[in-house]
Amino acid sequence: MKKFAYFPGCSLEKMALSYHKSTIESARKLGVEFEELDDWNCCGATAYFHVDELLAYTLCARNLALAEKTNLDMVAPCAACYKNSYFTNDALKKDPDLAEHINFALEEDNLHFTGKVTVKHLLEVFAQDVGVDEIKAKTTRPLEGLRVAAYYGCQVLRPRKDHEDVEQPHFFEDIMSAAGAEPIDFPEKLLCCSGSLIITNRHAALSMVRNLLQSAAQRGAAVIATACPMCQVNLECYQKQVNQEFGTDFNMPVLYFTQLLGLALGITPKRLRIGSELVLPTPAFSRVRRTPATP
Amino acid sequence: MASKPTFSDEIANLLHASHGNPIKICMQCGTCAGTCPSAPFMDHTPRRLIAMINANMKEEVLASNTYWYCASCYHCTVRCPCEIDIAGLMYALKRYSMWKGQFKEGLIGPVFSETFVKTIFRSGRSYEPILATTYLFTFGLQDFITEAQTATTMMLKGRLPLLPPRIKRLKNFRRMIGRVIPVGGLE
């Protein structure tokens, strides 16, 4: 059984609880076990780096040091937690003076960073460590006929790490295909959901969300699949505001990819917390040829 | 006689604590401006802002809203043929303008960042309802009502926390922060 140190992040505690539950459930079906980091702290999303770089690195290093104690590689389902952890790990490994300074601070919590863990995003774990063949083999209720817009967003892929294709990736679509769904051609799949601009620059943000919803709708997607809590909230919870601002009438369900994957693996909608959305996905599932049980 | 660094030097070296950003080799191709999803809302595109920095137009740069409209999506960074970390540059400008206490009037970004960081100091975790206080007062009545409806629905669906979460070893956590930056007044 594959095992990882699991860093859920603040959003998955409440706002994206469905992401957390569906991650654990799907992983279990696929033979992956997660050990949650003990007493992890906030990764800082996009705000720490606005204020102080050293502080930002210190806070992320604490989580990395917690992961090192487990002797496991670290996985984050949230794109921001992943990106911040990945690049802090990278920066500290490349700069021993910085690492020394931060280790001095970590002493206060009896922790130490050495740089021995690999940081992965959940999508990578499913696409690479588990693999699409395994997903295909374990799929008992394929999402046949369900047109999915696999939406990567930003920070799963960017900035560039080492080997990934930042212009034409397809591992997200591959996971959806393995679950029996039909990924649509979605050229906007790498565009930003507007992130925290939804709070700081509302009009710009709604316009960016509208652009994504419009493309997905025009291309006949029944549901958008995301791999980031910020993307999910912006695309789903602010649809009403988008409709109000632009006079549109979007009613596009936005689910975490683990929820769709979980359905294909035969997990009940209730265990995947399907039904906690503001835009209910039930009508989308009526298009699945063998409909999964409704919540 | 030693000369003072120019504004452009200052900004180029403000990045990543340890290594600079090659903004001076910018060839003004505009790939960043064409890529940026926020560009239509900025008063200067990223391309133009880099030209302004290289021309040492400090006042104009500090009066610009450009970097506060950056959502940190890094699309420009991965596409720049000169390998300038443009999103990193935007972060650096945010920090620079916050040090100087100089930013365009009416922006929510600086207050939001500070509130976010203070929330983390207090509890180690983020708490969405506190963050809402940074922007709700800027809303008109209709927007305020829609926002309140969304929040209520999310709360009913169990998606908003009622109480702020806290990490267990908060004392150690605060002392840890105290070793990298002065945090007087937060205790």
Image (spheres, coloured by chain):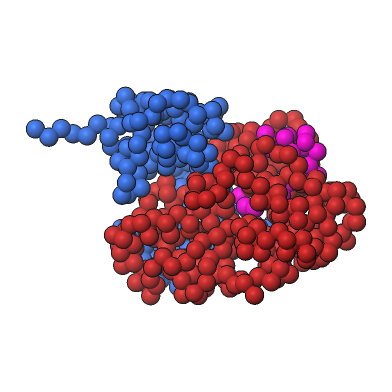
Chain colours: A red, B blue
B17 on left or right of B113: left
Whether A259 is drawn above or below B112: the answer is below
Q: Which residue extends farthest left?
A: B1
Is residue A26 depicted above or below A289 in this figure? below
On the image, the x and y values in percent for residue B175 come to 35, 67
Q: Would you say residue A38 sits in the magenta stretch?
A: no
Residue visible at 60% across and 72% down? A3
Q: Can residue A104 be seen by looking at this rendering? A: yes
Residue A152 position in % (x across, y down): 63, 47
Residue A220 shown in magenta: yes
Give the residues drawn in magenta, as a range: A211-230
Q: Is residue B4 left or right of residue B159?
A: left
Residue A113 location, x and y as percent?
Answer: 39, 68
Can see residue B152? no
Answer with the quarter of the image where residue B35 lies.
top right
Q: Residue at 66%, 64% (x, y): give it.
A: A130
Q: Can you give x and y, in whole percent of width and height, for residue A30 in the image?
A: 71, 68
Residue at 38% over, 29% down: B26
Is B110 above or below relative to B3?
below
**Nearer-the-camera pick, A20 or B157:** A20
